[in-house]
Image (cartoon, coloured by chain):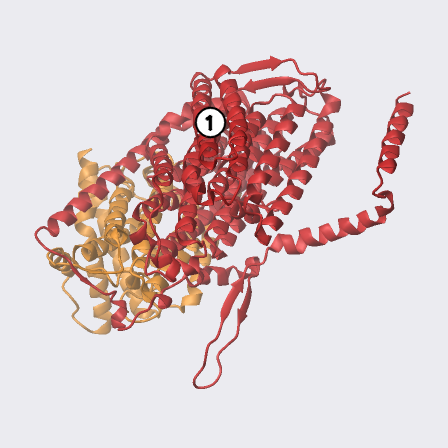
Chain colours: A red, B orange
Amino acid sequence: MVLLLLSFVILLVSAALSLCFRRSPARASAAGVYGAVAASVAGLVSAGRILLSGGTETLSLPWPVPLGSLSFNLDPLAAFFLVPVFLLTAFAAIYGSDYLKSYAGKKPLALAWAAFNLLTAAMVLVITSANAVLFMLGWELMAAASFLLVVFEHEKAQVRKAAFLYLVVGAAGALFLLLLFSLLSPSSPSFDFSTFRRPEGVLAAAAFLAALAGFGLKAGFIPFHVWLPEAHPAAPSHVSAVMSGVMIKLGIYGIMRMLSFLAPWPAWWGWTLVFIGAVSGLLGVLFALSQHDLKRMLAYSSIENVGIIILGLGLAVVGTSHGMYPLAALAFGGALLHVLNHALFKGLLFMGAGAVLHSTGTTELEALGGLAKKMPQTAFYFLVGSAAISGLPPFNGLVSEFLIYLGSFGALRAREASTVYAAALAIGSLSAIGALALACFSKAFGTCFLGEPRSANAAGAHEAGQAMRAAMAALAWACCFIGLASPLLVAPLAAAAGCVLDPRAASELLRYAPLPLSYLSAAAAAFLGAALAVALLRAFALRGRVPAAGPTWDCGYAAPTAKMQYGASSFAQPLTDFFQPALRAARHYAGIAGYFPGKTSFHTENKALFYDNFYTPAAAYIRRLAFRFSWLQQGRLQFYILYIVTALIALLIWKL
Amino acid sequence: MTKQLAQYLVVLALSPLLLGVVNRVKAFFAGRRGPPLPQLYFDLYKLLHKTPVYSRTTTRVFRAGPVAALACLLTALAIAPFGGRPSFFAFDGDFILLVYLLGMARFATVIAALDTGSSFEGMGASREVQFAVFAEPAFFLALAALAKTTGAMSVSGIFGALTPAVWTTAAPVLALVTAALFLVFLAENSRVPADDPNTHLELTMIHEVMVLDHSGPELAFILYGASLKLWLLGSFIACSVLPRHSGSWLTDAGLFTAAMFAIAVVVGVVESIMARLRMSKVPYMLITALAFSALALIFQVGR
């Protein structure tokens, strides 16, 4: 706990230092980066100790805020969420030191670094706070700091729009959280988490739904995702990595934490989560598949991965409510591990996308291509990230999905049909999500890095800077490490699961997970061995021979151009056509006419389905409603003071 | 352990023969003599001694793709069922790894195809990933139905527990599962009616078009990998229709191998008497397989 406090202080001090150095971008960056890395080292040691020992540390300090108390709680669940936060922010900071260099002099780098470290500090506060008031403080600080980072390039109209949407959604989410805490307060003696009790009857359900909406607006699962594909691509790439990789996971953390106060859980809560998870996963990856902007595609893919996490969480709730403890434990363990895994590979992929943006000036897939020759290392790391996020062996994505699958297959033995169907739904949607993710990421990697460059920008690309490559390499190795050493993670996962699940359920993880995960790791190693053996066979077959070089054969076509290559949209077209009823992409095709057709044009536009059909009408309705009360808003200070005085007097009278 | 090693080696050695059988059956229906049964062995030998040609557009991805794909299949074979006998990697949920290893093989093949910058290969890659979206859930749900029926969680466990008694009590479930597995098997191995391994220059092909630019040892790896995949997915069907286990390894292995060749004959017959489906209809075939598996699961839950 002392080390964690130290890391918190380092973050705040380095943020302040960055601001002090605002006249020298180099010093401001140095303060930000060294602060982030030092804080992460201290924080990781602290979190790692808790995870290995399985204990809990608490800290209470005096705080003169009504209802609030400055109390912190570092239990295994909090420690487990701190690991990706510290890991990713440290690597993102290292990456950012290179990435932001080109903005020096044009942009206030000092403010960007201060906001970055403040964001990390806020995330640490959210995770460790043990009091609702303190929690809300951290939550709002997190929203404010990330807002500052999203508006970094505020000269672009799209960025301003995204940032405003982000601000509004953040406020709406906070309102739901206030509702949640006020629903919990009648049954709880104070706002300390340790005193929270489950409210009676329908209030518990209302609290669950409020938590789902409030935290869902941060986690970004469907239908609360509208801000995510706008805001994440708008931020600088290392910030996108942090936002997509860890910040949205705090919504998951919130749901898990609140579930622990609301036990016992009825089965329909689990079903709601399973359904939301399956829909988010499937629609998220389908939307991602139909995008042709790399960063936007990655943002949609985050919706998919949050869907997988929620699916696992939902299965855990269904399993617990039906007494299927192995299902609950394995699905919860899988969901929790996916939080870490997604932080690693999504961080890596956003950094790869940032390297592409940095070197070519665009993330439009149809304008890229052939980058693997210009930036081979970035291509390799992006490839690792793509394979990992598609759940392919020998990387980490498979491990977390495997745990959810394993729990589901085991639950097929259950006697109640409803558990079996929940498991079958999970199996079916997870496998479809996996296959769609493979399509999505082979498209992304293929059109961006392989083939011939489709534009002059892509042809003039250069390799990313050293710090950027180092950060990506570290994350790629981490993906590989978890793929090969997953049994080591079972004990920390079980400790963290014990903070939310029934203790009987959490111990099942230790019973059912280690053996299959050992085999999984062994098989991953066997795969690498087999690849090495086949590669040696190839080298042996080719000994003493020089392979010939030529143009791509392409069935003998004599004059290929880069434009003839399969692009991002054409690659995805069979699937986007098939799922058109769900995607509803608009197409604009000028058509060709005459015997010697001239130029024509074709472009597709992905509609933001939920935004256009639900949120825009809802916002319009709220605005109409608000205008009816516009007479209250005079714009004169005296009137507002009068309102406050009236309200205070009314409250006093009511209290009397 | 020796028996498991023997099983593994039998598969490695015999799988190229399956394609020989398929081709001989097709030749018989067409009234030709056809290539000799061990033709693929000759091809592999020849290709391993050829010098490959690489396109200047390609990178290492193109060269590594076939290597990684073959490594995936070699690993997956260590999980594959063999007449209800335990395999090397037999653990709870091993089939999940098997499917994802096949996914990795697909990923490697697809990105190697995209590396050439050819529109033909892009087309094939695009179709390959499309069909997998329907095939994978169908395969998983079929396995779920089998797991529910037998109460086992590993490939060896499922097929070890699949006895004639199970067939007599749960025949509709197993029949539906077998049908679903067969449809997935045809599509995943790019056989008629999903794909035609004979066309090489048409816009309608899938798997063959992805490997147009590969030559020499890489092409040998791809062809060998294809024959291993044929065996791998075929073994699930062979094991579902062959529930009888004798005590002796030799009898079981012999019967299982015979069943595998019988499947090859069926594939040859299907290819001779059917036309390929139109490309846009292939997803519907796989959705049929998905429906069969889902129905099997529902039957089993209701039983």
* Quadrant occupied by the N terminus of chain B: top left
**Which residue is outermost to the bottom?**
A595
Residue that badge 1 annotates: A35
Q: Residue B226 at x, y = what percent?
A: 25, 55
Residue situated in front as seen by the camera: A8 or A248: A8
Q: Position of residue B252 (x, y in %)?
A: 23, 43
Residue B150 or B280: which is nearer the viewer? B280
Give the residue displayed 23% in from the left and 73% down from the top. B30
Q: Is residue B222 left or right of residue A419?
A: left
Of residues A126 and A239, the one nearer the viewer is A239
Q: Is residue A214 visible?
A: yes
Disc 1 residue type (three-letter): Gly
Q: Is residue A41 above or below residue A628?
A: above
Choose top left, top right, bottom left or bottom right for residue A633.
Answer: top right
Give the left or right position of residue B44, taking residue B234 as reference. Answer: left
Looking at the image, residue B268 sits to the left or right of residue A54; the answer is left
Question: In the rendering, at what x and y percent does residue A619 appear?
Answer: 72, 50
SS assignment at label 1: helix
Q: Residue at x 57, y 52 (%)?
A: A156
**Mark 1 packing: few (<14 Cα in 10 Å), some, or many (20+)?**
many
- Residue A455, by quadrant, is bottom left
Question: B294 and A274: which one is in front?
Answer: A274
Q: Most extreme residue toward the front, as rendered?
A: A23
Name the residue located 28 percent from the left edge and 52 percent from the top edge: B61
Name the image quarter holding residue B74.
Answer: top left
Left or right: B126 as drawn, with respect to A639: left
Tell me if I can see residue A413 in this picture: no
Q: Is A451 above or below relative to A418?
A: below
**In this picture, is A576 found above or below A306?**
below
Q: Position of residue A189 (x, y in %)?
A: 72, 17
Kindly identify which chain the residue marked by label 1 belongs to: A
